[in-house]
Amino acid sequence: MSIFRGNVDPPDRMKQPIPEEEDRVLDKVAKKVVMWHMTTPAIMFLESVKPLNYIGAQTMVFFEPIIQTIFNFTDYDTFRAAMERRENVENLLQKIEKFDAVAFEREKAIKKFMKAEKKNWKWYQRYLGLFKPKIQLPEELSAPLFPDMVKKKKSWFTGSGE
C-alpha cells in the first residue's frame, strides 16, 4: 500500500516506440522552432499545457478546416495524432532542446571565429567600423544548420526550355 494515489511505478520501458511518421513530423516542428529562435517560448508553452495535451489535440481537430486551407494537411493530421499522447509532448520538448543545443554550439563557434578574425583588424576597423574587410566563414559554419529544412529557390529558367 502506498500513500500516493494511482500508479507510482516507474514508466514501462516496453512501450511501443513512436511511429516513424510522427517522429518525422516532431523533428520538423522542433527544427522550425529552433530556426525561428522561439525555443524558450515554445518550451514554456509546452511545459505549461502538458496536462491539457488531449484537449489541445481536440482543439486542433476543431480548427482543422481553417488550417487545411493554409498548411500541408497530412503533416497537420499526423501532428494532431501525435499530440494526443502525453509522451509525445515530452519527446517534442527533448527534440527542441537537442536541436537548440546544436544551434547554440554553432553560434558559439561563429563567435569564436569572428573574435579571432577581428584580432587581425586595424584599430579603425575594430573600433570605428571603417573599411571593414569582407569575412568569409568556413564551410562548416556557413552551411545551413538544418539542410533538410531549406527550401530550394525556384527559378524562371529551370526546366527543359520547351
Image: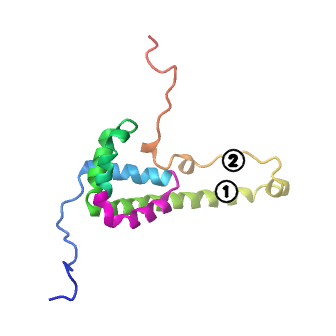
- Tell me, for residue 135, which label it has, or none: 2
Identify the colour scheme used: rainbow
* Residue 57 place in picture, x, y as percent: 30, 54
Q: Main secondary structure of the magenta part?
A: helix
Find numbered disc 1 in the image and state the secondary structure of the residue it sits on. helix
- Per the image, is 116 magenta? no
Q: Name the residue under label 1.
A: 114
Residue at the extreme front: 62
Residue 117 occupies which quadrant of the picture? bottom right
Three-letter code, disc 1: Met
Q: Which callout, 1 or 2, points at the residue further toward the start of the chain?
A: 1
* Residue 93 place in picture, x, y as percent: 38, 62
- Range drawn in magenta: 36-55
Q: Is residue 64 above or below residue 158?
A: below
Task: Please tell me which residue lies in front, 29 or 24.
Answer: 29
Find numbered disc 2 in the image and state the secondary structure of the residue it sits on. loop
* Residue 38 place in picture, x, y as percent: 50, 56
In the picture, measured across the screen, residue 6 lies left or right of residue 91, that is left
The residue located at (53%, 61%) in the rendering is: 104
Quadrant occupied by the C terminus: top left
* Mark 1 Cα-neighbour bin, 10 Å: few <14, some 14–19, many ≥20: few
Dot 1 and dot 2 residues touching (CB under 8 Å): yes
Quadrant occupied by the N terminus: bottom left
- Per the image, is 38 magenta? yes
In the picture, measured across the screen, residue 119 lies left or right of residue 20, that is right
Residue 92 occupies which quadrant of the picture? bottom left
* Residue 75 place in picture, x, y as percent: 32, 43
Task: Please tell me which residue lies in front, 8 or 136.
Answer: 8
Task: Please tell me which residue lies in front, 27 or 162.
Answer: 27
Three-letter code, disc 2: Ile
**Distance between mark 1 and mark 2 Cα atoms:** 9 Å
The residue located at (48%, 55%) in the rendering is: 34
